[in-house]
Image (cartoon, grey):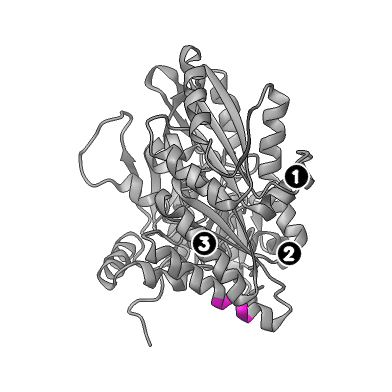
């Protein structure tokens, strides 16, 4: 779905004020140029009044004050890899791109921290940290392009979250500018600290609705001595999901535990040249890391757990090329599905790990009930399943069935004690479903928090939280 609205140009005075802050080279006002910054990795697109490229904190501060004075919406943006429309300027306003704030300010190995600007890509940060023997655990599949600011805005994590946690667990502090134009340093430079409320964790995952992030202090983790990768193939999906629950019920925590259903396996096989036959109906990718002296024992225990009825094979990747091939196949899934269904519905829901078998069973029934093809894969180790509804939006009947199916998927998630978004955020795509998960009291409190941070509602208005009070 593409959204458009009449483009209202800036006044001469407004444009001149932005030139005074950013200069001509860091400002776009021509609709043709601005259009590129009006979409993310969803089907939504809208035209902003202008696009600015922030290069320092002072510019960001002045911009917030300007937008407050003019009552202009202000939408923070990294590289546009989000999938929920959270950076789409559906109400016009100014898109603030942070892609040029890309300094790694400091890496302090002794304190296991790094201070970075929000425009640093995840991949560039990991490469810089590796030279010091460290990494930052969040590793979304878009790591080559996505920014740290975007990772923080969505609390985007990736496969390693099963062992190492999400950005919330791996961020010590932030420098932020609230919607009221206040520059605040929140958090600490230490792994302990309980002074005041935890604003850092509040801002992470808020999708640019409370504050702009201008710097982040990240908690680093030492690189493990060794990492080993296992490929496990099953004759049926039930066996694979049972194995996931058994793996997560014992002491050895894998650093990745990925799952693919039959269709996902077929696509991974096709695009990753895995050489699998038609008997494979489900696949797990398991990674375990740690000290060299205990890795073989841990591998033996994990492989033993996977040996349940329905197992076809359990193989340990023997070299770096084999590992790379597996992960390339896994990361090719989303692009491959987009080739099949360019406008597929892609949701990332989370259920308790023990409920994965029941959830997958519900999805199978919903697929048949609504005559919608559903493809499932994702981070099974923490119950984060990417549910893909392959739909042609130009087929109005199929689209209507898909919307009913999606609603039922969310109902199933909540009935099983899960949440409707794990790491893709809420944005516009899931905003109207939030009332099913959060109570009226909780939503009311969140809206009051939003008002305290952003009294004029300029920061990403209309995203994440549904209208409040709810009007029937």
Residue at left 40%, top 50%? 354
Q: Which mark is residue 269?
A: 1
Report the span colored magenta: 400-404
Query: Which quarter of the image is occupied by the N terminus?
Result: bottom right
Q: Are marks 3 and 2 in contact (CB under 8 Å)?
A: no
Does residue 97 appear in this view?
Answer: no
Q: Which mark is residue 341?
A: 2
Q: Are marks 1 and 3 in contact (CB under 8 Å)?
A: no
List the residue tagged with mark 3: 361
- Tell me where residue 193 appears, x and y as whole percent: 24, 34
Foreground mark, 1 or 3, reads 3
Residue at the far bottom in the pictured view: 472
Does the magenta portion include 345? no
Disc 1 to disc 3, C-alpha distance: 23 Å
Query: Which quarter of the image is occupied by the C terminus?
Result: bottom left
Residue at left 44%, top 35%? 163
- Tell me where residue 295 appears, x and y as whole percent: 50, 19
Q: Can you tell which quarter of the image residue 94 is in?
A: bottom right
SS type, badge 2: loop
- Tell me where residue 13 appears, x and y as whole percent: 57, 67
């Amino acid at each position: 779905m593409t959204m458009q609205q009449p483009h209202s140009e800036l006044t001469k005075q407004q444009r001149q004020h932005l030139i005074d802050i950013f200069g001509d080279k860091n400002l776009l006002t021509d609709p043709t140029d601005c259009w590129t910054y009006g979409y993310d990795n969803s089907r939504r697109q809208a035209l902003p009044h202008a696009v600015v490229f922030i290069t320092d904190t002072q510019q960001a501060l002045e911009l917030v004050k300007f937008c407050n004075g003019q009552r202009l919406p202000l939408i923070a943006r990294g590289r546009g890899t989000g999938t929920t429309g959270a950076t789409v300027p559906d109400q016009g306003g100014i898109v603030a791109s942070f892609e040029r704030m890309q300094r790694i300010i400091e890496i302090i190995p002794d304190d296991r921290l790094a201070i970075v600007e929000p425009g640093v890509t995840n991949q560039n940060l990991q490469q810089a940290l590796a030279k010091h023997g460290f990494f930052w655990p969040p590793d979304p599949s878009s790591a080559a392009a996505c920014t740290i600011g975007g990772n923080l805005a969505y609390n985007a994590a990736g496969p390693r979250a099963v062992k190492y946690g999400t950005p919330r667990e791996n961020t010590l502090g932030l420098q932020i500018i609230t919607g009221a134009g206040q520059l605040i340093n929140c958090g600490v430079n230490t792994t302990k600290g309980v002074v005041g409320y935890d604003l850092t964790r509040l801002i992470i995952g808020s999708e640019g609705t409370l504050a702009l992030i201008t710097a982040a202090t990240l908690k680093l983790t030492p690189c493990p001595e060794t990492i080993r990768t296992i490929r496990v193939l099953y004759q049926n999906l039930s066996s694979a999901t049972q194995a996931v629950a058994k793996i997560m019920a014992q002491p050895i925590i894998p650093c990745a535990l990925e799952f693919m259903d039959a269709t996902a396996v077929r696509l991974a096989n096709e695009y990753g040249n895995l050489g699998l036959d038609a008997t494979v109906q489900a696949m797990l990718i398991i990674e375990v890391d740690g000290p060299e002296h205990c890795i073989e024992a841990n591998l033996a225990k994990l492989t033993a757990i996977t040996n349940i009825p329905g197992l076809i094979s359990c193989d340990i990747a023997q070299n770096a090329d084999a590992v790379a091939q597996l992960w390339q196949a896994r990361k090719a899934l989303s692009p491959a599905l987009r080739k099949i269904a360019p406008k597929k519905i892609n949701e990332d829901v989370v259920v308790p790990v023990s409920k994965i078998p029941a959830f997958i069973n519900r999805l199978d029934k919903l697929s048949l009930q609504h005559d919608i093809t559903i493809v499932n894969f994702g981070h099974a180790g923490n119950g984060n399943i990417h549910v893909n509804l392959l739909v042609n939006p130009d087929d109005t009947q199929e689209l209507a069935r898909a919307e009913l199916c999606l609603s039922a998927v969310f109902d199933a998630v909540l009935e099983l004690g899960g949440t409707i978004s794990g790491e893709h955020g809420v944005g516009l795509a899931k905003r109207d479903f939030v009332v099913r998960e959060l109570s009226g009291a909780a939503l009311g409190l969140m809206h009051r928090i939003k008002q305290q941070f952003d009294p004029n509602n300029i920061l990403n208005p209309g995203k994440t939280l549904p209208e409040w009070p709810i009007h029937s």
